[in-house]
Image (cartoon, helix red, strand yellow):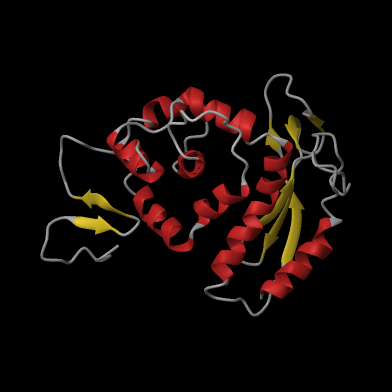
Amino acid sequence: MADPAGESKSAALRLDFDRRLILRFRGSVITSDGGLLAYRELDDAVGLTDTGADTLADARTGKNGRHLLCGLLRQSVFGRLAGYEDVNDADRLCRDPAMRWIVGGGAPMGRAASASQMGRFETEWLARRGNFAALADLPGHWIDAVHQRRRPRVIVLDMDSSESPTYGAQEGSAYNGHFGCTCYHPLFVFNQLGDLERCALRSGNVHLRDPATDQSGRSGEDRIPALASRRSTAA
């Protein structure tokens, strides 16, 4: 962003990640998610979604893909960041001016991905075994990218679990007496800054202290030594 304080001779403000984008008040074109553009600027500086897209395998075989893989990943991530948890929201977001610029590519002059496109991306492409494993490693790569700019002196890892309530007969969900609901019982690893280092999706009836394996067949607790070693090397 050329002038973060907004103090410039020009009434318009340009963002560095795409110099075609100009911020100015124009009542005829309004978005309620303009704050996402500041996060998109940070994403461009650190290269988070670009790194994520590089680790994922594109399952599309044809040449008619309307959006790049990194654009679909951005729409998925930034949509959750704005509080849109359902892919059905994409039918509205695909026309939103802020989301179109966040997705990039041809979206600013057209549309972002539709609900059906986002549904295929999240439930088919990301669910492939290779991409599933890459997604599990992705938070650590993102944290490494940030630490390259400012390395922490000490790293503390904390492992905890939580509940993710489910509705209907979802595979792997079960009633959990501790939480009093039908849910998944995921396992999380956080660092001292509150950043999510790793997570493992577990069945709802797994005991609180049970180091059960996740869908990749690896134990959450077994991965802690390797994660700690990689963190100490990065620091």
One can see residue 46 in this view? yes
Q: Give the image quarter of residue 141.
A: bottom right
Residue at x 43%, y 31% (from the top left corner): 66
In the displayed structure, does residue 61 sit left or right of residue 10?
Answer: right
Q: Residue at horizontal 81%, vertical 60%? A: 224
Of 222 and 184, nearer the camera is: 222
Find residue 123 and report its horizontal and vertical position in percent.
62, 29
From the top left corner, tell me how far across and down residue 38 is, in percent. Answer: 36, 55
Depicted 215 relative to depicted 161: above or below: above
Q: How many marks?
A: 0
The answer, for residue 195, to whether it is visible in the render is no
Residue, far front: 63
For residue 222, above or below residue 5? above
30 lies left or right of 151: left
Pick the front one: 134 or 89: 134
Which residue: 30% across, 62% down?
1
